[in-house]
């Protein structure tokens, strides 16, 4: 009886030694040689895996940085010190990538933009859009149900008291999540040097636009007339800024805007022109009365 | 539901639900014409596919029945003037779906007769199947049951498919709606004529007009216009929701199953709606265009519900006022209560795909307490209800986590045709079908952005 146990143990031991040897050999023979710096660089990255750099995650980005295919500064989540540390470690130039932020092309909060029907369903923008457009009078405007805020992993978007998302410029890393989340395509990623910004997407013009939202662009074209030639053109009842001529941009363009639909963004502040109407109302507008 | 012996002999499919029918409001009301509204709004993209291209300019006068927009490619249809008048504007107007689309605004001449003078007779017997398909495109016909998919595209038989049966769908399984019921009673001859055109165009040997067994008078009416030993027949299937979904109906009538992700042509069947077929039978011999359709205006929120023949482009505000809408209602649905969409504005027009206008009054809305959502306890009521044999319970959980791709890849989300049976039966009041719609729209957007 004892012998049986002994043989069994010995056999298993022998088998273990043989298989272990094969494994040890295989790991030597079949090992994939990888640059050890990739692990180091990945360790120095913020592990957000957000995709803002354009790579699928932090590891593929680290591989690209080590190969010299991308500058360390392409990671918009990392701090300046962190980027410099990677550059020092690899002995390369940190490079300079201009900071980009997500911007909302709408200013129609509940105190200035009207609803024509109350939406009571599932509280997400995408569900509201599927239900007859969500009930906002302006069919292009922000519905205020915070799909962007929920999608933001960096806590950079918050809804203000008028149900309008506000982007925290310091926290925003331009990861593109809100751009994808918004069913109305109101968000876009913009370099911070672009200060002139059209914060409206309404294709309606004049009184029709105003009846839906008090801060809508009425397509009066004053900004296009006042700005440097060729900087702003009118297209489909909206001004379009040619950012190729961004160096010509100045605050002159926004000064005569009657509604404040075109704004100047500087240091996280929204600056409206002198002629823009002052909004002092804080409470939400009532739902449009039905004429019938 | 009481046990009915006849159900044993009528075709049906497994799963599905029995919502309250509520058809008594309008089922016995004959189709009526109304005077023209003062202004019609005609969106250029009221069908699935590419928007039509306008043929008229601002200020141009048009005659009832005249083409005012042409088809842009094969998957598109032309548009005809529903009334005589003048095109007063071409601009963006709200639609029932939400986003504004380019629309023609037609100011109707007062006193315009409803007679259609446009069109020329054509001998359909001389046309080849391909010529019939082109002629159908010229009439601007789309699926009048609600999908608004161009009919002639469905009539084009795909390579390698042999169509043996044309199935005309007169189930109208949506509660409240009675347009198809009335059409089968009143336009049975046109309906049979349309069926014969479809059979000839698609090379089918038989045509079956199917309806639910709560509309046996419609079966009688159709049988009266059939010849002895006719290759067109009328049958009744079990009254059950969603009997009117084409895959369910094929299973019920022919006992054939359409493979997932494929079309009825894969099993040799062409399915068309009753309203579409009746219009085809009416318009084709004179080569006219679709300019009006039957709409059921119903629900406790209107004083005079009924079935009305209204011109395409009629603003729903005008239609509701004509039916005695007092403005007290809170909930307006275009189409039926199960699959129809909420309307957020009274200024949207009746389009080709809109068969009903349902006005629910205050007390019919679910209360806050009834809307309260409870956690899913995996009771599988939704699994029992899903006619596509999906697992809405698991799909709902994935949707809650936002795993939309997994839903499509591993749980056949794209086979869901959004009938809403799962939401209807869910005792926890989880809005399952709404989740699936969000998931599908999100997936579609991702595909569109990637390409």
Image (tube, coloured by chain):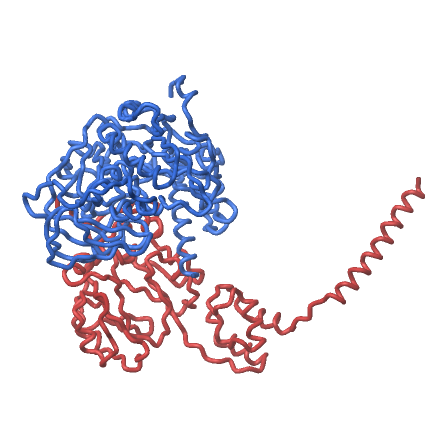
Chain colours: A red, B blue
Give the camera-side residue of A273 and A63. A63
- Residue B231's image quarter? top left
> How far across and how far down the image is residue B409, in percent?
51, 49
Residue at 40 percent across and 39 percent down: it is: B430
Q: Residue furthest front?
A: B126
Asked if residue B149 shows in the view, the reply is no
> How far across and how far down the image is residue B448, in percent?
40, 58
Location of the C terminus of chain B (image quadrant): bottom left
Q: Is residue A18 above or below residue B438?
A: below
Give the camera-side residue of B29 and A53. B29
Location of the N terminus of chain B (image quadrant): top left
> How far across and how far down the image is residue A92, in percent?
55, 82
> How far across and how far down the image is residue B14, in percent?
46, 30
Asked if residue A62 shows in the view, the reply is yes
Q: Is residue A102 above or below residue A81?
A: above
Residue at 20 percent across and 33 percent down: it is: B307
Residue at 17 percent across and 60 percent down: it is: A210
Give the camera-side residue of B444 and B256. B256
Q: Is residue A211 left or right of residue A125?
A: left
């Amino acid at each position: 009886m004892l012998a049986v146990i002994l043989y069994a143990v010995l056999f298993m031991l022998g088998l273990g030694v043989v298989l272990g040897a094969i494994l040890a050999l295989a790991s030597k023979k079949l090992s994939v040689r990888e640059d050890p710096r990739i692990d180091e660089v990945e360790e120095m990255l913020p592990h957000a895996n957000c995709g803002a750099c354009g790579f699928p995650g932090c590891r593929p980005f680290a591989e690209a940085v080590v190969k010299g295919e991308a500058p360390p500064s392409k990671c918009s989540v990392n701090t300046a010190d962190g980027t410099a540390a990677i550059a020092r470690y690899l002995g390369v130039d940190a490079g300079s990538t201009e900071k980009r932020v997500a911007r909302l092309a709408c200013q129609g909060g509940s105190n200035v933009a009207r609803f024509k029907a109350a939406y009571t369903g599932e509280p997400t923008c995408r569900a509201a859009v599927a239900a007859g457009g969500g009930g906002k009078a302006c069919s292009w405007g922000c519905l205020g149900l915070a799909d962007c805020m929920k999608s933001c992993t960096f806590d950079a978007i918050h809804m203000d008291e008028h149900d309008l998302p506000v982007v925290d410029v310091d926290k925003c890393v331009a990861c593109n999540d809100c751009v994808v989340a918004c069913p109305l395509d109101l968000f876009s990623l913009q370099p911070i040097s672009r200060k002139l910004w059209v914060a409206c997407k309404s294709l309606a013009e004049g009184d029709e636009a105003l009846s839906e939202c008090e801060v809508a662009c009425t397509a009066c074209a004053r900004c296009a007339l006042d700005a440097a030639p060729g900087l702003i053109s009118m297209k489909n009842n909206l001004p379009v800024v040619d950012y190729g001529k961004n160096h010509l941009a100045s605050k002159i363009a926004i000064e005569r805007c009657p509604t404040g639909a075109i704004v100047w963004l500087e240091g996280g502040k929204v600056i409206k022109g002198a002629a823009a109407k002052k909004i002092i109302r804080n409470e939400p507008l009532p739902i449009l009365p039905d004429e019938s | 539901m009481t046990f009915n012996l006849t159900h044993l002999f009528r075709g049906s499919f497994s799963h599905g639900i029995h919502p309250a029918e509520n058809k008594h409001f309008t089922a016995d009301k004959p189709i009526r014409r109304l005077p023209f509204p003062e202004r019609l709004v005609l969106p250029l993209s009221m069908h699935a596919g590419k928007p039509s291209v306008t043929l008229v300019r601002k200020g141009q006068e048009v005659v009832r029945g005249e083409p005012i927009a042409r088809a842009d490619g094969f998957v598109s249809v032309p548009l005809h003037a529903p009334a005589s008048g003048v095109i007063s504007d071409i601009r963006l107007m709200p639609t029932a779906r939400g986003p504004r689309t380019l629309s023609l605004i037609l100011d109707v001449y007062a006193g315009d007769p409803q007679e259609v003078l446009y069109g020329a007779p054509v001998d359909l017997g001389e046309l080849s199947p391909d010529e019939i398909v082109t002629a159908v495109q010229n009439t601007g016909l789309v699926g009048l049951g609600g999908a608004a998919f161009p009919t002639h595209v469905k009539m084009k038989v795909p390579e390698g498919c042999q169509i043996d049966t044309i199935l005309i769908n007169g189930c109208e399984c949506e509660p409240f709606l009675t347009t198809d019921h009335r059409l089968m009673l009143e336009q049975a001859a046109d309906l049979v004529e349309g069926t014969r055109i479809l059979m000839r165009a698609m090379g089918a040997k038989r045509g079956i007009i199917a309806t639910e067994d709560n509309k046996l008078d419609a079966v009688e009416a159709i049988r009266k216009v059939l010849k002895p030993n006719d290759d067109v027949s009328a049958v009744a299937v079990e009254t059950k929701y969603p009997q009117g979904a084409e895959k369910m109906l094929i299973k019920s009538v022919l006992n054939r199953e359409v493979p997932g992700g494929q079309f009825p042509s894969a099993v040799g069947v062409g399915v068309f709606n009753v309203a579409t077929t009746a219009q085809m039978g009416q318009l084709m011999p004179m080569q006219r265009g679709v300019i009006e359709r039957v709409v059921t205006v119903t629900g406790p929120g209107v004083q005079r519900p009924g079935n009305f023949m209204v011109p395409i482009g009629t603003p729903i505000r005008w239609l509701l006022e004509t039916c005695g809408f007092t403005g007290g209602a809170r909930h307006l649905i275009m189409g039926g209560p199960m699959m129809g969409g909420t309307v957020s504005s009274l200024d949207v027009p009746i389009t080709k795909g809109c068969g009903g206008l349902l006005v629910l009054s205050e007390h019919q809305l679910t209360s806050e307490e009834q809307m309260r959502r409870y956690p899913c306890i995996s009771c599988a009521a939704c699994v029992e209800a899903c006619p596509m044999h999906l697992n809405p319970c698991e799909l709902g959980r994935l949707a809650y986590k936002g795993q939309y791709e997994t839903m499509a890849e591993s749980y056949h989300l794209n086979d869901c045709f959004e009938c809403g049976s799962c939401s209807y039966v869910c005792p926890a009041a989880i809005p399952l079908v709404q989740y699936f719609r969000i998931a599908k729209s999100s997936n579609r957007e991702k595909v569109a952005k990637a390409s």
